[in-house]
Image (tube, rainbow, N blue to C red):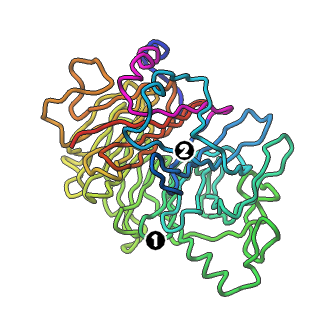
Amino acid sequence: MKERGKGAGRSVDERYTQWKSLVPVLYDWLANHNLVWPSLSCRWGPQLEQATYKNRQRLYLSEQTDGSVPNTLVIANVEVVKPRVAAAEHISQFNEEARSPFVKKFKTIIHPGEVNRIRELPQNSKIVATHTDSPDVLIWDVETQPNRHAVLGASTSRPDLILTGHKDNAEFALAMSPTEPFVLSGGKDRYVVLWSIQDHISTLAADPGSAKSPGSAGTNNKQSSKAAGGNDKTGDSPSIEPRGVYLGHGDTVEDVTFCPSSAQEFCSVGDDSCLILWDARTGSSPAIKVEKAHHADLHCVDWNPHDVNLILTGSADNTVRMFDRRNLTSGGVGSPVHTFEGHNAAVLCVQWSPDKSSVFGSSAEDGILNIWDHEKIGRKIETVGSKVPNSPPGLFFRHAGHRLLTSIGIHPIPGQLLVFLMMVKVLVEVVHCRYGG
């Protein structure tokens, strides 16, 4: 696998300058927040408050430092202005060097190693999981974790739970089930590993004496010393072993995702160019293995929450593919419903809209965020944010406000609008963009 965040196409500065000139035309609202350190991951959390003109939303992001201060997991609160509320002057005064008053840091957790991936638990909004450069998955209760100051020499925060089971580093592939408190991970050991957080709760119920907070005292649970190279604070955290370990990939597993309707069904993609569907009820072997799903390494995958037959994949071949799980292959290789070609570099992230079943976003090493609607393929539409006369089929919005884009988050708000969260090198942006029905 190539190191993520490398590579670009044509002049990034030229493209950014052109985008900046179009900001007042493209967006209803934009919040730009400059960060001190780069961030490898971002994630929307729960909605905290609704008001007349804006909502307050939880935001999780990471800070990847140069070692002069510790790496951190940051919990922030974002005020998202509602559609048609922001004054026109707000957009016209856009300044990429500014720190937005709409983004406020709530809590800092000193993380053992860089935060490569953040995922939240749908059944409990205060629980998040993180991946770092270790074999373990770290679980955090962001409400009970103490707020820390990231200064040189500060000890790392202690995870509330450590999920063990990988034999080598698991850096990016991480997912939480929308139906049950299950966690899924993939790593360099080629394994896909499944846990249930309920197993930890069951252990505490059986042994009430071990129910102390990891942040205040040791526990009687089995200890883990792998995370962060055996960090003492991390090693005091309780740990659980997996429900299942699944081997079917021939190279690093880059991403995993659950079926939206079942915690027992999930899929994975990897550097072996394979897409694999699994069913934990039938054993540890692949239920379906799609060879040559792309022409290069696969970096990302997402399962449509509205139509469980549709799966998206993104690859180092610069394309996004949409598969129908009822007809995944043809002639022994992957047979996508459609291939979306709108990036000039490896695709790092794909995500379905939680609000509209045919809409999804993709981001790549070219710094571009594309918004697609597969239902518009074959229909003549004008792409917003792009002056390209012959836009790729299905593409209807292009965000070019970043020089390097590593992660996206899509969150629906009323009025047929989307809020897009983009995390990049030293920049967060939250924007409104209108899409048609």
Q: Which residue is mark 2?
A: 42
Q: Quadrant of the C terminus?
A: top left
Q: Nearer the viewer, mark 2 or mark 1?
A: 2
Residue at 82%, 70% (x, y): give it. Answer: 217
- The image shows residue 324 at horizontal and vertical percentages of 23, 52
Between 57 and 269, the residue placed more toward the observer is 57
Give the percent coordinates (x, y) of residue 130: 60, 53
Please report the residue visible at 37 percent of the width from the left and 43 percent of the height from the top.
418
Residue 196 position in % (x across, y down): 53, 71
Q: In this view, which residue lies farthest toward the right?
A: 153
- Apparent side of residue 283 relative to residue 3 in the rendered image (left or right): left
**Left or right: where does residue 318 sit relative to residue 252?**
left
| Secondary structure type for disc 2 | strand
**Where does the image place residue 220, in percent across and percent down from the top left?**
77, 77
Q: Of 430 and 194, which appears nearest the observer?
A: 430
Type of amino acid at the residue the image marks with label 2: Cys
- The type of residue carrying mark 1 is Glu
> What is the magenta range?
16-38
Secondary structure found at label 1: loop
Residue at 65% in and 63% down: 141
Q: Which residue is mark 1?
A: 180
Q: Residue at x 75, y 60 (%)?
A: 225
From the viewer's perspective, tell me whether residue 428 is left or right of residue 156: left
Disc 1 crowd rating (10 Å Cα; few below 14, some 14-19, many 20+) is some
